[in-house]
Image (spheres, coloured by chain):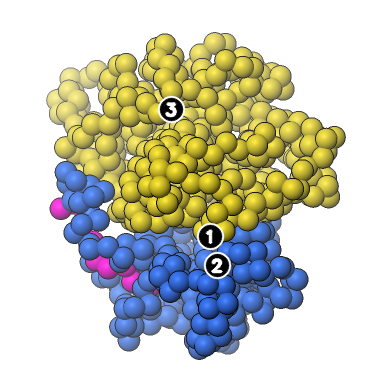
Chain colours: A yellow, B blue
Amino acid sequence: MSKKVNMNIKVEYLTRVEGHGNIVVNVKDGSLGACRLDIVEAPRFFEGMLRGRSIFEAQHITSRICGICACGHSLSSIQAAEDAIGFKPSQQTIDLRKLLLHYEILDSHILHIYLLVAPDLLGVPSFSPLIKTHNAVVRRALRMKKTCNDVCDILVGRHIHPISSVVGGFTKLPREKDLEAMHKHLTDMRVDMDETVQLASTLKFPEFDRETEYVGLVSDDNEYPLLMGDIGSSDGVRMKKKDYKKITNEFIVPHSSAKHAKLSRESYATGALARLNLNAKKLHPKAKKVADALGFKTKWTNPYLNTAAQLVECVHCIEDSIAIIERYQKKGINHNEEVIVGLNENKQIPVKAGNGVGAVEVPRGILFHNYEVDKDGIIKNANCIIPTNQNVNNIEHDMKKLVPEILDKGQEKVTLALEMLVRAYDPCISCSAHFLDVKFVK
Amino acid sequence: MNKPKVAFFDFACCEGCQLQVANLGEQLLDILGVIDVVEFREVMSEKWNKEYDVAIIEGSITTPHAVDRIKKIRKRSKVLIAYGSCATIGGINGMKNNFELDEIREHVYPDNAKHFPTIPTMAVDQVVKVDYYVNGCPIYPPEFLKVIKAVLKGIPYAVPDKAVCAECKLNENVCMYEKGVICLGPVTKAGCNSWCINNGNICYGCRGVVTNPQEQAQNDIMVKYKISLDLMLNKMNMYNKCREIDKDE
């Protein structure tokens, strides 16, 4: 580190729900002072508002926490709700929920890869200049995004705030022609996916390494765990989801309103990269091949490669979705399982008092929902821990290692490297996009 | 021809309605051919410091800072569109108004409640004048296209003021009341093509209450299906709590 360097970096933002951040870095006479990612949540008080509502309304309400991974919130919420009242979903319901989660991850990853990361790697400030210079790429991105949206429309009514996926199962189940349509969309998408992989293999990700603890769902079977499993870590931790608070160990830091998380060491990471590091062996063979081609051996410790991990997961999600659909094309969907819930006024689903946890791998990592309900299924307490909050602490530790390593490159390059680092974690779309506005405090 | 300068702004919301724009797919490029998007934080970092021809507002007003900000945006905008339930009727954020503000604040942030200034949730038109409404949680893309066309032509867009039931009947859905569950379709504005009921769920009232709800008819429904007023109000208060606050202008 050069001795006389002074640097003050402040990247400002506008507040929003899933977590907006300021990057603040101060270097004086070559030594690193403040180095942090401040998160301030625009308070919407979901956990407070849920009190007094029926457990059957929880997924509808909490899906509105985030428009980007509405299906993920919905699935974690449903899992927590069913756990609380002791309801066991059918195998068909579980399979279709897995399908929905695949769609969700695919949709969000594509948005992140193309909208946020590609402009950086193609050397432009945002997506819009690409309309002129890379029209085919833009059209492909929009086409893939539209396909994700279309398959969600077919399965659950719409992607943003799913309609038919509820506690108990589905209010409307796909018909034969629906399965056919989803199958066609996804098999057609393979062409665009191949080209995306092609494009990605030409991109150069920044070099940086910091090994950390990787946390995600783990299981004993051969399936890449996304919807269900225990919580595990690369440091050998394994716990049941009901013990989620022992995983996140949230603590308060003075500079940030978001609670920070740690487990076995100073911080941990969750998300696509963590999932790959924990469960790469269980990926679909075609996704494994892509991981191999991108240079994945047993573990990636460069956080910038989270985007590459997302790409691998996209291939997995497409292929496994096609497999699920083909299975049900063969054996048929049992439409007698369609549920009518509404507020459960006609007591279709038995309710009892309880405390339930949902732990689901959503695009950005493990998402926890926790509800406590009374004997009538009215919510007494609610808690949601989003992946971004879990990652903030890890991002800061990355920053602290990264800054001294690249300090001699000058303020502009350091700032860009930090922005790209935060963006790699995909903390949430508008949040990351906003890191593009850089202000220097002299 | 000068393309109209259009800007998107988000207040308290999930930003899902903005994403609905991205979900238009390649159709989005057609729209971008006739307008000039000058601010859209979700996808671009560029800023515009002159007048906006059209400001599209997403989210509800929930902090003192947001009140100032929306007033400033209004002053700089020729046309202002409230976009999505949070903006048009307060939406799901209005559920906060079912509680004492200090109580809910301390419940969620027991240690640092004071860092989160909050006011009762308001729809955009409870603070400033709104020229066009795109209702729904999320917005219904075909309706958004209709509104955009109306704005570009400079003609008004009338939000359908009949009940969701009118569209639901045309879609030949079995009435949710016949299935034994409450649905807000009879009092909620149409225009969504009964999206939720088509998919086997109920109407939650996200588009807002029709101007003249058929109170007597709704009363008859409640008597016939033995529904308590409390349950009905509880449902209404999920999206429509803010209607209890008067419009500012």
Chain of residue at mark 2: B
- Which-is-in-front pick, marks 2 and 3? 2
Q: Is residue A424 magenta?
A: no
- Determine which residue is flagged by label 2: B182
- Tag 2: Cα neighbours inside 10 Å, few (<14), some, or many (≥20)? many
Q: Please check whether the numbered discs 2 and 1 fall on a single chain.
A: no
Residue corresponding to mark 3:
A241
Q: Residue at x 68, y 63 (%)?
A: B198
Question: Magenta residues: mostly which secondary structure?
Answer: loop
Q: How many marks?
A: 3
* Tag 1 residue: A345
Residue B27 in the image, given as x and y percentages of width and height: 68, 61
Q: CA distance from mark 2 to mark 3?
A: 34 Å
To which chain does the residue with label 3 belong?
A: A
Measure the alpha-carbon separation of dots 2 and 1: 8 Å
Is disc 3 surrounded by few (<14), some (14 to 19) or many (20+) residues within 10 Å? many
